[in-house]
Image: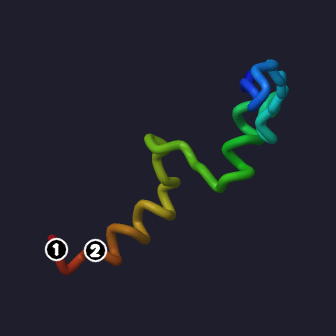
Amino acid sequence: MSETTHDGTVAVTASVPPDEGLPADRLAAKYGLTVSGARPSLVEYVRQLWDRRHFI
């Protein structure tokens, strides 16, 4: 990235994002992301089903 200063010269700044170079799995873990299409285990599925039984 470059910016022009008040006297007309060009100042070059190299700003590197703090997350650059992290693998996707570590980047996701850093921000608490999970797989959106992941299926719950059978035990978790039954627990969710029981919690939502009043809708059935």
Circle 2/circle 1 CB separation < 8 Å? yes
Q: Which residue is mark 2?
A: 52
> Which residue lies under the disc numbered 1?
55
Q: Is residue 7 above or below residue 56?
A: above
The residue located at (19%, 80%) in the rendering is 54
Closer to us: 16 or 31: 16
Q: Is residue 6 left or right of residue 50?
A: right
Q: Position of residue 13 (x, y in %)?
A: 83, 27
Dot 1, how many residues are within 10 Å of its Cα: few (below 14), some (14-19), or many (20+)? few
The image shows residue 13, relative to residue 19, as above or below, that is above
Work out whether residue 42 or residue 8 is closer to the camera in this orientation and state it. Answer: 8
The amino acid at mark 1 is: Phe
> Which residue sits at x=54%, y=43%?
35
Callout 1: SS: helix
In the image: residue 33, left or right of residue 14:
left
Residue 16 at x, y = what percent?
81, 32
At a point 77% along the width and 36% down the height, the residue shown is 17
